[in-house]
Image (cartoon, rainbow, N blue to C red):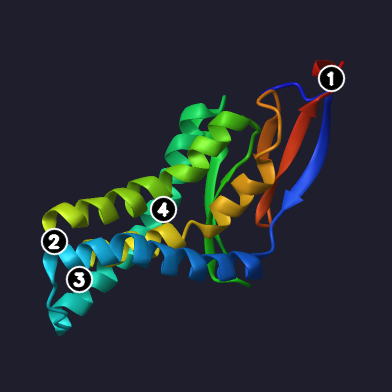
Amino acid sequence: MTNLDHYTKEKKTIDIYKASKLAVILFIVSLILFGLPFYFLWHPDILFSWYRIMIFTMLFIVGIVLHELIHGLFFGLFAEGGFGSVKFGVLWEYLTPYCHCNEPLRLRHYMIGAVMPAILIGVIPAIASLFNGSLMLLVLGVIFISAAAGDFMVMWVLRKESMESLVQDHPIEPGCFIYRNDEAVI
């Protein structure tokens, strides 16, 4: 475990309600960015059936779990304590699942872990839908880009921090603690 004696700790949390508003904005922007080209490329027939709704619902639930597992995978890869430092849970007050790393990570590692779900189950499926014409893949990609709104907000809060800093998830609030190395400041 990293010795934090020469680090200054600061709490950096986000407003979950602002994250919800950002999620709506990301949904609209992603839908325009990926949906318009999709429409002109594929001229989709939007047919709803119980079968498609059930498949979509199952994929949506799997995607929610995958989002947190992807965070956990990358945090576990970078944590000194490995996957034993990663915990999962739900903030029941907000009905928000989370992945929590119990130890500080280098800022760049934390950022990678934070952005990977948006890329892997958001951006990549949305781009893939442009090539294969899958409307379901497009919609799921757009949803999971917007589902990363909280992750994007935390990354935004950390954007000006030094790469020498360490970041640790806040154990009960949406956000983190930043540890700035006092010895690195001259």
Residues at discs 1 and 2 in contact (Cβ within 8 Å): no
Q: Is residue 36 above or below residue 85?
A: below
Q: Residues within 10 Å of mark 1 (few under 14, many from 20)?
A: few
**What is the quadrant of residue 29 in the picture?**
bottom left
Residue type indicated by callout 3: Ile
Which residue, given by chain and number where applicable, does mark 4 sit on? 67
Which residue, given by chain and number where applicable, does mark 1 sit on? 185
Q: Nearer the viewer, mark 3 or mark 2?
A: 2
- Give the distance between the C-alpha atoms of the residues marked 4 and 2, in whole angstroms: 23 Å
Residue type indicated by callout 1: Val
Q: Residues within 10 Å of mark 2 (few under 14, many from 20)?
A: some
- Give the distance between the C-alpha atoms of the residues marked 3 and 2, in whole angstroms: 17 Å
Which residue, given by chain and number where applicable, does mark 3 sit on? 55
Residue in the image at 45% along x and 62% along y: 146
Residue type indicated by callout 4: His
Question: Element at badge 2?
Answer: loop
Q: Quadrant of the N terminus?
A: top right
Q: Nearer the viewer, mark 3 or mark 1?
A: 1
Residue type indicated by callout 2: Gly
Q: Is residue 132 above or below residue 77?
A: below
Question: Element at badge 1?
Answer: loop
Q: Residues within 10 Å of mark 3 (few under 14, many from 20)?
A: few
Viewer-proximal residue among 72 and 151: 151
Which residue, given by chain and number where applicable, does mark 2 sit on? 133
Q: Is residue 153 left or right of residue 140?
A: right
Viewer-proximal residue among 76 and 23: 23
Q: Is residue 95 left or right of residue 65?
A: right
Q: Position of residue 96 (x, y in %)?
A: 54, 65
- Give the distance between the C-alpha atoms of the residues marked 1 and 2, in whole angstroms: 52 Å
